[in-house]
Image: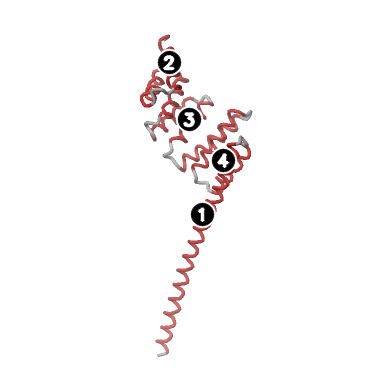
Amino acid sequence: MLVAARQSDFLYIRSRMARLVWYTGISCVAGVLLYLSLLDFVANIHYRRGLAYDENMLWDEAVEEYQRATSLDPHKATYHKKVGNLFFRMARLRQEKETYYTKAIQEYARAIQFNPLDGFSYNELGWVFLWKEDLGQAVFYFKEAIQRDPNNVFFHGSLGSAYKRQGKLEEAQEEYEFVLTLFPNNPQANKALGEIKTLLRKE
């Protein structure tokens, strides 16, 4: 009887301990999920503050808020792309061009890392290299953008711009003609195509 009672007590204690471990595990998981949701919430607050500063051309304040958002949620491609856009804009308007170009490239690269299917990050990265006169890299990233969205006229227009700068006029003509098949009245494509045809006639 005593042995049976002890076995019964042991089984009871073991079952209680199992329940305690189970409930504790559930509590830990719930705690982690709550913590992550709070991080996402706070990161979004900083991101929206950044957008407000950005719209009012308070770029340094916007960068600070965007970077707070990326530090809290480092895997959010949208945040990295947005701060990349801002650094790219600052590179064209401020004296420390190379510093801001480098920062823009780093942010676009992170955006691509966390969302490799987004063609716009590749396209924007291509434009950074185009402004840096690194035409080979620009063409590479514009082509990467097109691979992800073959019918995007912005991407084909970007590649046309790079080809034109490289002096590859026939390739540029093909890209702009593709744009015009989808948007016949696109003024930028019509203008660029007219310039290219003039240059080709002179050759």
Q: Is mark 2 in CB contact (under 8 Å) with mark 1?
A: no
Mark seen at residue 37: 1
Q: Is mark 2 in CB contact (under 8 Å) with mark 3?
A: no
Spatial CA distance of label 2 from label 1 is 53 Å
Location of residue 119 by image quarter: top left
- N-terminal of the pair, mark 3 or mark 4, is 4
Disc 3 marks which residue?
126
- N-terminal of the pair, mark 2 or mark 4, is 4
Disc 4 marks which residue?
51
Q: What's under tag 2, amino acid-wise?
A: Gly
Q: Looking at this view, name the residue that lies furthest to the bottom.
A: 1
- N-terminal of the pair, mark 2 or mark 3, is 3
Mark seen at residue 161: none
Disc 2 marks which residue?
194
Q: Position of residue 143 (x, y in %)?
A: 41, 30
Frontmost of labels 2 and 3 is 2
Q: What's under tag 4, amino acid-wise?
A: Leu
Residue drawn at (47%, 41%) of the image: 113
Q: Is mark 1 in CB contact (under 8 Å) with mark 3?
A: no
Frontmost of labels 4 and 1 is 4
Q: Position of residue 43 (x, y in %)?
A: 55, 48
Note whether 138 is above or below 42 in the view shown.
Answer: above
